[in-house]
Image (cartoon, rainbow, N blue to C red):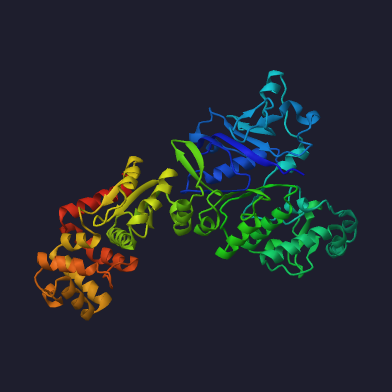
């Protein structure tokens, strides 16, 4: 049987989204990006438009910029319909055509087009929701209608949230009712004495709901969730009314499965949704990582079919987990971006440089701004300066939404920076100037609006700090080097760097141009460089350079000031 999939989503004037047009993937759509970019609002819009509900509670705050004069409009086009939904007798005037290549959605059939239905939810200033099927042809004939309740229930997405009571009982629309055609008749058990009803129904339910119970057992075992064997369907003692929802899943020990932890519950429900895919193919998961350890995040994604060529489900997911980004491929990840209320959802992509960047620096895709540093030294240096700035009352660059990326060398600097440029992140580059990158790559980056922060001509980071700090700062750098490597090694390196004209004792004396140069060369020697790790350069930035900046050479200070202004959003 065909499995319904969302082909197109259009959102107007809903919460932070003034306008969005998006053609999602038929498989996993994992939305990433900085906080408050509208990711959860997109999931809410899908749920409100397609959910099997008779009413929704909305307020003025759900309108873009609180402007209730501009109605909320959520329009979703659904393809891969089954025969019942494509029936001319049922929805003939509302069947439309979708061209996956051009993205055209038209009322009239198109050669090679797919038959689709388009659902619209509109909400005006009276806060009353109106659901309709979209068809210009029908409107011209004065017709208006919506899906039958049964079809709405079948197309309704299943949302996995923190609360799972609904899905772990045989209630209308729950995943358990979608696993099989089995339905329990509770009347016989409930007719018995109230004290015996729970146990009596538990004994009879295995015959009535056995297939569903075995599917749940198998799924839990596959996902490593400890629910035990011989699950039972028993009357829920906490239920107020005697109805289908009175029947809930219980473990072999009689404890309701709703007592599972949040993570186990979400993982189990995702697995069950996979088993129920023939009845409901769209799943919504907000904050994928909530309640899950890293290895269980990977397992949940596996249960959704993230490695399968033919995805069993169409999943709409939001996440702030680097684990999830590293696990998924670039065509399953999409960045949500907003420019003056106009939203876009852009696939990250699957080129080698993009995939490599995702694997190495997934956390950077979760920040609004990215500073790509030539190497570990620059990353540690910026982190150290930031720690010093925070200690004296300044705002952290992390609070400003900046993520630092280690490009691991000048040759891959723009290989790491350009994927972020293509996805419209704020991206800057920080590099040495002793070795030059590709001129063409740097020109392309600059042409795209990316700022390049670099040390003065011919200088490395070590050159800059040893030639720019005050005499007291230089003494502090030397003391750090001795702390990290010991006097004997530092003395030998200074002798080598100065052709035996200077030693550690001389460098501990008056600071001169010669001693600065010898220490700068020694610090960046190929064997045992003084500070070329994140942690060591972080200490240097925090303890030595940061406190000495007020006394530093103006040219060096100007470079850092410009970089910091950019990181703060200037």
Left or right, 531 with reference to 135: left
Image location of residue 466, percent across then percent down:
18, 63
Image location of residue 267, percent across then percent down:
64, 60
User: Please, which residue is most extreme toward the bottom here?
Assistant: 488
**Nearer to the camera, 236 or 369:** 369
At horizontal 32% and vertical 45% (from top left) the residue drawn is 440
Q: How many marks?
A: 0
At horizontal 15% and vertical 59% (from top left) the residue drawn is 551
Check the image and report above or below for 158 versus 322.
above
The quadrant in which the N terminus is found is: top right
Q: Is residue 344 visible?
A: yes
Q: Is residue 293 visible?
A: no
Image location of residue 502, percent across then percent down:
12, 74
**Nearer to the camera, 306 or 38:** 306
Check the image and report above or below for 144 versus 180.
above
The quadrant in which the C terminus is found is: top left
Image quadrant assignment for residue 229: bottom right
Check the image and report above or below for 293 versus 164.
below
**Nearer to the camera, 385 or 358:** 358
Left or right, 478 with reference to 115: left
At horizontal 24% and vertical 60% (from top left) the residue drawn is 461
Image quadrant assignment for residue 118: top right
User: Please, which residue is most extreme toward the top here?
Assistant: 141
Left or right, 79 with reference to 214: left
At horizontal 78% and vertical 29% (from top left) the residue drawn is 88
Image location of residue 65, percent across then percent down:
48, 35
Image quadrant assignment for residue 62: top right
């Amino acid at each position: 049987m065909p499995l319904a999939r969302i082909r197109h989503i259009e959102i107007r004037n809903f919460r932070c989204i003034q306008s969005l047009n998006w053609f999602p993937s038929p498989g996993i759509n994992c939305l990433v990006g900085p906080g408050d970019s509208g990711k959860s609002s997109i999931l809410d819009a899908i749920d409100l438009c397609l959910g099997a509900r008779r009413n929704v509670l909305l307020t003025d705050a759900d309108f873009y910029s609180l402007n209730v004069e501009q109605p909320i409009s959520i329009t979703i086009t659904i393809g891969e319909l089954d025969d019942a939904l494509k029936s001319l007798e049922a929805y003939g005037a509302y069947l439309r055509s979708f061209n996956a290549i051009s993205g055209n959605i038209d009322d009239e059939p198109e050669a090679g087009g797919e038959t689709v239905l388009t659902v619209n939810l509109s909400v005006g200033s009276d806060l009353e929701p109106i659901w309709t099927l979209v068809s210009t042809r029908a409107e011209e004939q004065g017709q208006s209608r919506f899906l039958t309740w049964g079809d709405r229930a079948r197309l309704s997405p299943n949302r996995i949230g923190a609360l799972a009571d609904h899905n772990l009982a045989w209630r209308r629309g729950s995943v358990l009712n979608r696993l099989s055609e089995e339905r329990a008749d509770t009347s016989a058990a409930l007719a018995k004495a109230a004290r015996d009803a729970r146990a009596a129904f538990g004994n009879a339910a295995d015959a009535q709901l056995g297939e569903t119970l075995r599917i749940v057992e198998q799924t839990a075992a596959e996902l490593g969730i400890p629910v035990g064997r011989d699950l039972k369907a028993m009357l829920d003692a906490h239920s107020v009314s005697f109805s289908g929802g009175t029947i809930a899943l219980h473990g072999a020990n009689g404890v309701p499965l709703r007592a599972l932890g949040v993570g186990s519950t979400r993982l189990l429900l995702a697995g069950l949704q996979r088993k129920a895919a023939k009845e409901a193919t769209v799943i919504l998961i907000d904050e994928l990582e909530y309640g899950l350890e890293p290895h269980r995040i990977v397992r949940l994604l596996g249960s959704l079919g993230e490695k399968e060529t033919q995805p069993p489900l169409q999943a709409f997911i939001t996440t702030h987990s680097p684990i999830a980004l590293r696990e998924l491929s670039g065509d399953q990840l999409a960045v949500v971006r907003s420019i003056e209320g106009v939203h876009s959802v852009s696939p990250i992509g699957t080129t080698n440089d993009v995939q490599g960047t995702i694997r190495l620096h997934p956390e950077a895709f979760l920040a609004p701004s990215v500073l790509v540093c030539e190497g570990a030294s620059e990353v540690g240096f910026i982190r150290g300066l930031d720690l010093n700035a925070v200690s004296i009352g300044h705002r952290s660059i992390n609070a400003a939404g900046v993520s630092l990326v280690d490009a691991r060398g000048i040759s891959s600097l723009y290989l790491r920076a350009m994927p972020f440029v293509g996805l419209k992140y704020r991206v800057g580059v920080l590099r040495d100037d002793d070795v030059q990158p590709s001129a063409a790559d740097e020109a392309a980056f600059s042409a795209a609006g990316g700022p390049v922060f670099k040390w003065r001509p011919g200088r490395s980071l070590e050159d800059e700090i040893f030639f720019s700090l005050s005499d007291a700062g230089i003494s502090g750098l030397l003391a750090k080097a001795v702390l990290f490597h010991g006097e004997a090694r530092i003395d030998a390196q200074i002798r080598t760097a100065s052709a035996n004209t200077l030693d550690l004792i001389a460098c501990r004396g008056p600071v001169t141009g010669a001693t600065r140069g010898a220490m700068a060369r020694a610090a960046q020697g190929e064997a045992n460089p003084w500070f070329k790790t994140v942690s060591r350069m972080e200490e240097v930035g925090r303890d030595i350079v940061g406190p000495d900046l007020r006394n530093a050479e103006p040219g060096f200070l100007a470079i850092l000031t410009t970089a910091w202004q950019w990181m703060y959003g200037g």
